[in-house]
Structures are given as C-alpha cells and as structure tokens.
Amino acid sequence: MKQSRIKWTMLALAALTIMGSYYTYDSIAPVAGMLRDQRGFSQSQIGLLNAVFNLPNIALALVGGILIDRIGAAKSILIAALICTLGAVLTAVGEPYELMLLGRLLFGLGNETLYIALLVGIAQWFHLGGGALAIALFFSMARVGSYSADKSTSWFADIYAMGWQAPLWLAAGLTALGVVTALAYYAMDRRFPHLRAEPQPPERFEWRSLTGFSRSFWYILWLNVLFASVFFPFRSTFSIQYFQDVKGMTLAEAGTANSWVFAAAIFATPIFGLIADRIGRRATLLTIAAGLMPLTFLILATTSYGLWVTTLLMGVSFSVIPAVIWPSTAMLVEKHRVGTAFGLINMIQSLGLAAANYGAGWLNDSFDAGPKNPQGYDAMLLMFAGLSLIALLSTLLLLLRERSQPGGGIEARVIGASDPALARH
C-alpha cells in the first residue's frame, strides 16, 4: 500500500511540474494583441516567439534522452525546470525584443528535456502496471495548464489590464512553482529508489539507425509532424488574436473560446485512448480525426458559422490524435528502436513547429491581417488547411497499408504493451 501511495504521489508531482510549463508555453497567445498594440511587434515577431521555442528541440530530441540516461530522470527534471524558469523570467522582462527571444529559446531548451524526463520518470515508477492510465492523467493535467492560460484572460482580468508584461510575470511565477515540485520529486526519488525500475543502460547511437523503418512508420511520422504544425501554431500563437480581429471578441471572450478545445481534451483524451485499446481500428480513428482539421480551417475561412462548430471539430481531432498516435507508433517499430524512432519524430516535429509559427506570422504581415483587414488572415487559414490535407493523405495511405497487413496491423484490437514513456503532446 505504501508503494502505491508513493508512485501516485510521484505522478502528482510530475503532473504539477508539467502543468506550469504548458501554461507558460501557451502564455504568448493571450498577450499577442497587446504585444502588437503596445510594443509595435509585427506578426512575424510574435510568431517567432513560439518558433524559437522549438529550435533547440531539433537537436535535443535526439540527445536529450541520452543525457537523461546518463544523469537520471529526477536530476534531469530539476535542472530542466530551473532552465525553464530562467527562460520564463527573461521573457517576462521582455525588453529589448532580443531578450524576450532569448527567454523563449531558453524556455524551449529546458521544456523539451523536462517533458521527456518526466515521461521517463513516470515509466520507471509505474513499471509494474498502470502506466497507460498514469500517462493519460499526466496529459490531462498538461491540458489543464493550456486551458488555464487561455482562461487567464478572464480569471486574471486585472493583471491583463496592467499591460503585456504582468501576464508574462504570472506565467514565470507558475513556472517557478514547477521548480518546487521538481525538487520534491528529486527528494522522493532519492529516498525511495528501490521502488522504481532501474533505467536500462543506454544504447550506442548510430546514424544508420535513423533509416530502415517501415513505410507505415513514415506515414504516421508525417501525420504527427503536420498535425502539430497546424494545431499548435494556430491555437497557441494566433487564434486569440484572430478571434478578436475577425470575430469581434473581447480578449476575455477570445481566451474562453480558445480554451474550449483544451478543456475537452482534459477529459476526452483518456477516453479515446481507452476506445482504441478496446476496439483497435487505430488507423481508422486517425484518419477520421485528421479529416476534421482541413474542414475546420475551410469553415473558418469561408463561412460565418459560430465558433462552436470549428471548436467541436478541432476538439475531437485534438482529443483523438494524441491519444492514438503515440501508442500506434510504438507498435510500428522494434522495441530496441523505439527511442530512436521517437527522437526522429520529435526532431522533425520541432522543425515543423518552428517553420509553421514563423510562416503563419509572415503571411499575416504580408496580407496586412488585422482588425481593419480581417480578410488578411485567410492566407494563414488556407496554409493550415493545406497542411491538414497533406496530413489526411498520410493517414489514408497508412490506413490502406495497415489493412493489408497480416493480422490487421495497428487496426487489430489486441496489441502488445507499449512503452508509456514514449507518449507526446
């Protein structure tokens, strides 16, 4: 009984640590309009704040796991939380613009390592069972951070009334609380090392291990990269500003509208994961969810339907794909190559996130998007719709290939255990 209480306590500490990190990542969208109006930032500069967050991850996705294996998950969590806090503080100081960019760069540097180390730690503590539920709950708490960042526009309206800087200091404070929980995690890990799994000796990395994956793996890789490159640049960078300029919402209303997707994911993501485990049909679920994304942006660009329509479509897609895609990916590669496979995906995903964030801002600037020219946002929406269509094509190819496999491939209901440490946001 004692062991059970300890491992769930470790999960709670991990979840609280990542929650503040997700809040800080999503803290740019609520202040994007103020950065434009009060500091004269272009939309390219705003997009670059989240683009630069992903740049360190292009390299760290491959080397971060090696570092964690060398010094241990608990120590990596604490160091990464400190780096995240330093980055959040520099972002809040924010002047000049280059200092804010450096802050976001450092925050991204720490955040990727923090994320991977927390997942490795959870896998070690739940090695005897319950890992899938633990990861689902971990992701749900991460979504609480994103939801809170959007709702902060109404929860902390007085802070937002003070200008662009105060909300970023709030984010820095929440990130600093993650250092406290990371320190508690480290202390408990040192006290009860016999209750967790011992990490396996790290494998020697070879560049040729990046090749030789099946065609299904490459299809699911591009779905993963393209979905992330559409969803996060829109929802975490430009959506609140878009809702204000195009839909005529106040900052609080736009933040609430943006939060609906994350609120739904808190509860729906574990449910869809359970459905996939019970009925299989993973490629089918991914195809349906991917098909909702281009439809979302086409509706936004060409109709005046209420936001609840597109929020519902995007919410279902965002709940299904993270719940299904990572366990499915782990099924497509040999166990000894799973770490390499996920490192490759995260590397390319980070590159896509950086390019999509900056590209969307550049399009908005090029077409003079803003409250006086709401049609200027159409180019950004069409870019996201086009990327979504390519993602849908990847899932269709995956579905056709997997249905042709003996035993049904990832469409089959019965699967082997997957490594919960390899889940991703």
Image (cartoon, helix red, strand yellow):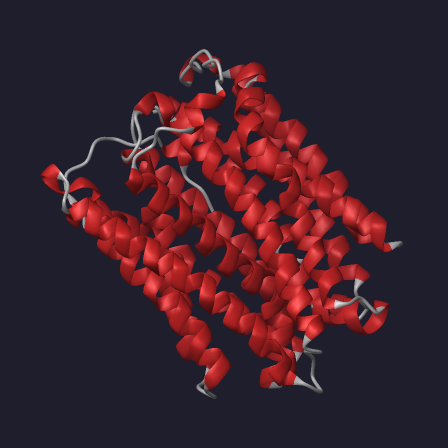
From this viewpoint, which residue is outermost toward the right?
96
Up the image or down, 55 lies above or below 396; here it is above
The front one of 181 and 163 is 163
The front one of 117 and 368 is 368
Image quarter where the N terminus lies is top left
**Is there any visible trace of residue 99 in the rendered image?**
yes
Left or right of residue 198, residue 254 in this image: right
Up the image or down, 333 lies above or below 187; here it is below
Up the image or down, 275 lies above or below 153; here it is above
Q: Which image quadrant is residue 227 in?
A: bottom left
Left or right of residue 168, residue 401 in this image: left
The spot of residue 387 in percent (x, y) is 46, 61
The spot of residue 266 in percent (x, y) is 42, 56
The spot of residue 308 in percent (x, y) is 43, 78
Residue name at image x 16 percent, y 49 percent: 279
The spot of residue 250 in percent (x, y) is 65, 81
Residue name at image x 44 percent, y 46 percent: 139
Residue name at image x 68 percent, y 78 percent: 369
From this viewpoint, which residue is outermost toward the left?
407
Q: Which image quadrant is residue 132 in?
A: top left
The front one of 159 and 414 is 414
**Is there any visible trace of residue 11 in the rendered image?**
no
Q: How many marks?
A: 0
Residue name at image x 61 percent, y 60 percent: 149
